[in-house]
Image (cartoon, rainbow, N blue to C red):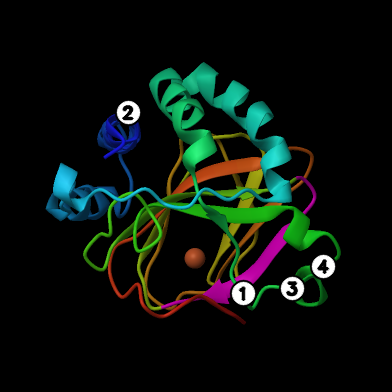
C-alpha cells in the first residue's frame, strides 16, 4: 500500500470534514453524518489511476486562493493533486454546453467508486469550472452539497436567478431540483458531495 497517499487522502477528507463542521448551512450536518459512516481504513483504500484534464491549468490559481481562507485544505489538495483521477460526465459535450466547456470542466472523486475509498452510496469530491462558462440546468436524484472554495461563482436553484456565492458558503440541492452554475472572470474550485442515490447520473434539463 502507498502509505503516504493513504495518509494524504485521509488528510484531505479530514480537512473537508473540519471545514464543513465549522459552517452552518442546509445539508451540512447530513453530509458530515454520511461521511462519518464511510469506511476509511487501510483495507478500504485503493489508489486510483491518476488522470488530468485541460481545466487543471487553473488549479494553481485556485489553490492560491484557497490558501487565504482554508490553508489546511489548500495544502491537502496540493499534496494529493498529482494522484487525483479527473473525469468528465460522458454525455457532456461542447455542442450541449457551449464552446470550450469540456476544456473547462472536470471532477474528481475522493470517496466514491473512482476515489481513494469506495464509499457506501456516497460521493465526495472536487469539481472545477474554468472562467466564463455556464454549467446549465441539470438534475439528479442524489441530494447534493457544494462548498465553493474560490470567489466569483454564481448559482441558480429551481430555475431561479443566479446568485453569487462567496468562497466558503455552501449550496444545498434537494433531490431532482434543477440547478446551474456559472463563472465569469475566475475559475471555480468547489468541494461537492452526493449523500445517497448516487447510481443515477446528472441529466441536463
Ligand atoms: Fe448537481
In terms of sequence position, does the residue under pointer 4 or pointer 3 come before the other? 3
Comparing 109 with 45, the one in front is 45
Front of the two marks 4 and 3: 3
* Location of mark 2 (residue): 4
In terms of sequence position, does the residue under pointer 2 or pointer 4 come before the other? 2
* Residue 93 disc label: 3
Residue at point 26%, 52% (across, down): 31
* Location of mark 1 (residue): 90
Q: How many marks?
A: 4
Q: Within the image, what quadrant is residue 200 found in?
A: bottom left
Front of the two marks 2 and 4: 2
**Overall secondary structure of the magenta stretch?**
strand
Part of the protein shown in magenta: 131-140
Marks 3/1 in contact by CB < 8 Å: the verdict is no
- Residue 57, placed above or below residue 52: above
Residue at mark 4 to residue at mark 1: CA–CA distance: 15 Å
Front of the two marks 4 and 1: 1
The quadrant of the rendering that contains the N terminus is top left
* Secondary element at image label 3: loop
* Residue 98 disc label: 4
The quadrant of the rendering that contains the C terminus is bottom right
Residue at point 13%, 54% (across, down): 37
Residue at point 45%, 22% (across, down): 75
Q: Is residue 137 visible?
A: yes
* Secondary element at image label 1: loop
- Residue 83, placed above or below residue 4: below
In terms of sequence position, does the residue under pointer 2 or pointer 1 come before the other? 2
Q: Which residue reaches farthest right?
A: 99
Q: Is residue 113 left or right of residue 85?
A: left
Amino acid at each position: 500500500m502507498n502509505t503516504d497517499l493513504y495518509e494524504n487522502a485521509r488528510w484531505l477528507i479530514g480537512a473537508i470534514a473540519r471545514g464543513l463542521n465549522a459552517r452552518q448551512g442546509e445539508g451540512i450536518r447530513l453530509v458530515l453524518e454520511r461521511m462519518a459512516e464511510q469506511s476509511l481504513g487501510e483495507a478500504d483504500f485503493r489508489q486510483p489511476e491518476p488522470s488530468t484534464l485541460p481545466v487543471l491549468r487553473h488549479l494553481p490559481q485556485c489553490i492560491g486562493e484557497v490558501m487565504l481562507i482554508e490553508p489546511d485544505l489548500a495544502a491537502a489538495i496540493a499534496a494529493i493533486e498529482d494522484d487525483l483521477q479527473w473525469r468528465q460526465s460522458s454525455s457532456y459535450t461542447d455542442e450541449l454546453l457551449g464552446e470550450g466547456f469540456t476544456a473547462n470542466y472536470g471532477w474528481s472523486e475522493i470517496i466514491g467508486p473512482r476515489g481513494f475509498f469506495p464509499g457506501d452510496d456516497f460521493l465526495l469530491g472536487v469539481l472545477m469550472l474554468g472562467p466564463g462558462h455556464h454549467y446549465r440546468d441539470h438534475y439528479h436524484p442524489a441530494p447534493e452539497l457544494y462548498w465553493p472554495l474560490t470567489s466569483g461563482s454564481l448559482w441558480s436553484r429551481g430555475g431561479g436567478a443566479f446568485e453569487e456565492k462567496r468562497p466558503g458558503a455552501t449550496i444545498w440541492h434537494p433531490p431532482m431540483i434543477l440547478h446551474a452554475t456559472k463563472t465569469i472572470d475566475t475559475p471555480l474550485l468547489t468541494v461537492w458531495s452526493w449523500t445517497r442515490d448516487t447510481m443515477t447520473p446528472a441529466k441536463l434539463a
